[in-house]
Structure formats: structure tokens, C-alpha cells
Image (spheres, rainbow, N blue to C red):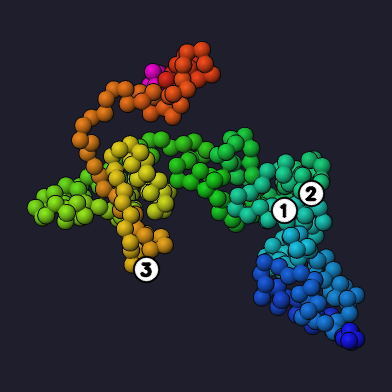
Amino acid sequence: MADVKVKQESADPVDIENRIRDLCQQFPHGITDQVIQNDMPHVAPQQRAMVINRLLSMGKLDLLRSASGLMYRMKDAQTANKMKGSDNQEKLVYQIIEDAGNKGIWSRDIRFKSNLPLTEINKILKNLESKKLIKAVKSVAASKKKVYMLYNIQPDRSVTGGAWYSDQDFESEFVEVLNQQCFKFLQSKAEAARESKQSPMVQRNSSFASSNEVWKFICELGISKVELSMEDIETILNTLIYDGKVEMTIIAAKEGTVGSVDGQLKLYRGVNPIIQPTGLVKTPCGVCPVFDDCHEGGEISPSNCIYMTEWLEF
């Protein structure tokens, strides 16, 4: 059977450009040359390449690398105007930073991906910062290092530390206040259940509260200067569970119930220990996971135990 050959014709470059724009809007993550070829089989490869190169040179199109090969993506109009006049090296660095998303990228990694000298990268980064195309953000993971990301992107929690960090400093007092207020709310919930004089099972069930209820209570108190999410409150509730002050149960929930995940809802309630823990349990040795391997003269020993030292100093 003979191969079917498609007759290639000359087309209007403006029509080709408009069609490429339409394809980029249909596939915002990018299109390959094969997608363009399949959409416009009658256009000669040379003419197609000429239009693509024109869009790239005008800064209207981004050239990306992916597992499937080269891809093209339409650039934001505002960014395209700011990048007008930038050389290829500056465009490359901007693209690398854009691909890093909201987690950012170290200058060392930019150097590795771009193969540009460090002095040139520093110059490009300062230029992009002055144009307000990118910004430098200090990471809690490394206090002396900065990551770069696009100017209008909100940094990931892994970079800023979320609500528990301010200027890279852990807000221990703020966390302690949240601990106290969350526990106070659950205690009041349990107390109200006991005073209802209902059956023990009803009292127990009504003493539970969802993380959404606790979150609403904390928001209404107005003790936080930053916006807290339910995930933040669940983190605090988890610390109370580890302290033995709160217990959690999971129940089936109707679809659409606030705070439920995959048809399951977490409920929390304050508890009082039946007996006070012994003095040994309060020491580091009482909860040490390597207690059995600890002995004098060994790699783990009481004399060089940092946890014991910190506990004694406290």
C-alpha cells in the first residue's frame, strides 16, 4: 500500500501565528511541534519554523524542555512586555525560575541548569529583580541562603515555614498560646457535655469537636496576625494528642461535610489523665526510642545524651 502524501501549501504567516496562539490557549501547559504539525498538515515545515522563531524572538512564546522533548508555551502579555529587549541568557534564567514554581530555586541550581558563570547569573538576577519579574525569598531550611521565584507567586509553606515562622524565627510563644486556647475550647466542650446530664454515650459524643469548629473558635478570638488554615489547627491538635491532652476519632461523614476528607471526618476531645505520669516518664529516658541501645561507653550513652543535657538545663 502506497504512503499517503499530504500536499503542503504556502499559508498566510498571520493565520499560522493566530492558530499557534489558539493551540497554546487550548493546551496551557505547552504544545509540541508534532501538535502544530497535526493541526496544520498542509503548512510547509520551513514556514512553520519561521513563524515559531518569530514568536520566540518577539518574546511571545516560551521554549520549554520536557520528557517528551521541546515544547512551546504562550507567554503572559505583561511578562512579555517586561521581557522585551532581554537577551537569550536572561530569558533562559527567567524560564528556569518559572519552572521552579512556588518552591523557588537556589542560584547554584540555576547555574547548574543554565551552564552560565556565577557572575553572569548574579547580574541577571539583579536585573530581573529590578524589573519586578522575580523575587528572592529567605528559606527556613537554610537561613543564609535565598531561593528565587516569580514576583507574583506566593511561596510554598516549606520555604516560609508557614504560620509558625516570622522572619525565619520559630514563634514558640504563639504556638504555645494556640495550644492553650485549642485545649481550653475542647475542655469547655467536654464540660458542657457533662453538665447536660444526658446518657454517658450522648455526653461522650457531644464532647467531640471537628477541626473546623476549633478553627472557627480560634479565628473569632482574633489572636493570630496571620491567616490560619484548618491544616494549621490540626497540626496544633496533633501536638495536644502527643501530650496526652486530646484524643482523636475518625467517623464516616456525608459528602460535602466541612472538614471531611474522602468521606471521613476527624473529631477531637479533651481528656484528663486518670493518673499523673511518673517522674521517669517525664524524663527523656522515659520516652527515648533508643533506650535499649543506651549504655555507658557506647555510641549512645547518658554522658553524651543531648536530650538529657537540654532537659537538665531547662
Sequence-first disc among 1 and 3: 1
Residue 266 lies in the magenta-colored region? no
Q: Along the line of sight, which residue is nearer the eye, 182 or 265?
A: 265
Whether residue 109 appears in this view of the structure is: yes
Mark 3 highlights which residue?
Answer: 255
Tell me the residue at 47%/13% (across/down): 296
Q: CA distance from mark 1 to mark 3?
A: 41 Å
Disc 2 target residue: 114
**Secondary structure at numbered mark 3:** loop
Q: Provide the secondary structure element on which disc 2 rests.
A: helix
Residue 103 against residue 172 in the figure, above or below: below
Amino acid type at circle 1 is Ile
Query: Disc 1 or 2, which lies upstream in sequence?
Result: 1
Locate residue 185 relative to residue 58 in the image: left or right: left
Secondary structure category for the residue under label 1 = helix
What residue sits 25% from the left and 52% below the top?
208
x and y percentages locating residue 242 in the rendered image:
35, 38
**Residue 305 visible in the snapshot:** no
Q: Which residue is mark 1?
A: 96
